[in-house]
Image: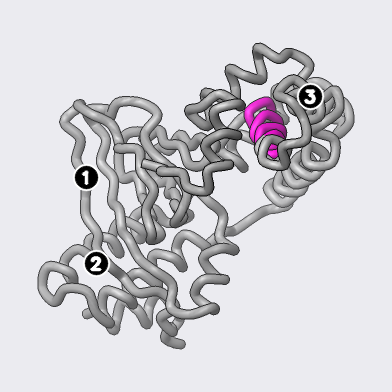
């Protein structure tokens, strides 16, 4: 049965495994608890089958609905943003790349997306769980992991979607080039000649966060580099990173990193930091 599924999914051409499957499961919420905050050493692919799931990873937020997937990367702190909904059901799977080719493929993938064939995505996960129960990790599970990644990478962009994707990329490029200047959603929308509401919706769909959240993320990443360089005081770091309000800078920094700027500088200067 597995061979016929692979042939149907790949057009009969077969597939070469670039990942090794570790484990997988199906989560059914009882309306209690939330996803734990942690750092893992493998990739994790989450697919929401029903309900909604709110997650964060390294400063980015993701609000997933049924039919959407999320790829979490190793070495990045992630966790839940809200309590599990009672109707939430999602699949999860952990895997690692095989060699440089597998690693490059995974790093090139977006962090989240909507499945073009939700039924097929869920079917592959159910087959994967069955394969793991019967045979454990091995070639069969690896093949099914490949099919899941193929589904995650399957896109059928029309002209409007391609234009929207291009606009989102232009917005991100502008933020990276001008984060230390006066910048807001309204100013960026004016620069790109679109409405602020449309730009926010587009960026939330493309990046999993609002324009303001992305601006702050880029500014705070720059602030971290300046703090570790040790040449500027905290106030100077804030201004050099694009923050005109020192109190706001401190609040945003603590919200993202769980430390004040001064604590961050001190902890990292010691040469060892526990992430969890």
Question: Left or right of 92: which side holds 225?
Answer: right
Q: Residue at x 68, y 47 (%)?
A: 161
Determine if the magenta segment contains residue 221. Answer: yes
Q: Which residues are magenta?
A: 212-223
Q: Quadrant of residue 149?
A: bottom left
Residue designated by label 1 = 27
Q: Quadrant of residue 10?
A: bottom left
Helix or strand or loop: what does disc 2 sit on? helix
Q: Residue 220: horizontal and vertical position, in percent?
A: 66, 33
Determine if the magenta segment contains residue 183. Answer: no
Residue designated by label 3 = 236
Distance CA(mark 2)–CA(mark 3): 53 Å
Q: Residue 274: horizontal and vertical position, in percent?
A: 41, 43
Whether residue 106 is visible here, answered yes or no, is yes
Residue 128, disc: 2
Crowd rating for badge 3 (residues with CA inside 10 Å; few <14, some 14–19, many 20+): some
Distance CA(mark 1)–CA(mark 3): 47 Å
Q: Earlier in the sequence, mark 2 or mark 1?
A: 1
Crowd rating for badge 1 (residues with CA inside 10 Å; few <14, some 14–19, many 20+): few
Helix or strand or loop: what does disc 1 sit on? strand
Residue 181, disc: none
Question: Left or right of 95: which side holds 223?
Answer: right
Q: Residue 137: horizontal and vertical position, in percent?
A: 22, 74
Q: Residue at x 41, y 81 (%)?
A: 17
Q: Earlier in the sequence, mark 1 or mark 3?
A: 1
Vertical position of residue 154 compared to residue 37: above or below: below
Whether residue 184 is visible here, answered yes or no, is no
Q: Residue at x 85, y 23 (%)?
A: 182
* Pair 2/3: label in front: 3
Q: Tag count in the figure? A: 3
């Amino acid at each position: 049965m597995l061979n016929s599924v692979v042939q149907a999914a790949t057009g009969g051409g077969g597939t070469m495994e670039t990942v090794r499957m570790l484990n997988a499961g199906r989560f059914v919420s009882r309306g209690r608890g939330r996803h734990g905050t942690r750092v893992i050493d493998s990739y994790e692919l989450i697919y929401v089958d029903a309900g909604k799931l709110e997650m964060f990873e390294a400063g980015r937020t993701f609000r997933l609905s049924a039919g959407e997937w999320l790829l979490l990367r190793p070495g990045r702190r992630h966790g839940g943003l809200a309590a599990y909904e009672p109707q939430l059901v999602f699949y999860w799977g952990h895997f690692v790349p095989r060699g440089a080719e597998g690693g490059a493929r995974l790093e090139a993938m977006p962090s989240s997306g909507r499945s073009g064939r939700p039924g097929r995505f869920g079917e592959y996960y159910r087959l994967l769980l069955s394969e793991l129960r019967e045979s454990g990790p091995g070639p069969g599970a690896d093949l099914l992991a490949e099919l899941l990644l193929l589904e995650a990478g399957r896109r059928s962009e029309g002209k409007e979607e391609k234009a929207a994707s291009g606009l989102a990329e232009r917005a991100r490029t502008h933020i990276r080039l001008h984060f230390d200047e006066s910048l807001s959603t309204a100013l960026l929308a004016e620069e790109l000649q679109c409405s602020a509401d449309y730009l926010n919706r587009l960026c939330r769909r493309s990046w999993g966060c609002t324009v303001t959240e992305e601006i702050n993320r880029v500014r705070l990443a720059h602030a971290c580099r300046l703090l570790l360089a040790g040449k500027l005081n905290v106030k100077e770091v804030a201004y050099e990173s694009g923050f005109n309000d020192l109190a706001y800078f401190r609040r945003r920094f603590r919200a993202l990193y769980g430390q004040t700027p001064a604590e961050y500088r001190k902890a990292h200067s010691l040469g060892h930091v526990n992430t969890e």
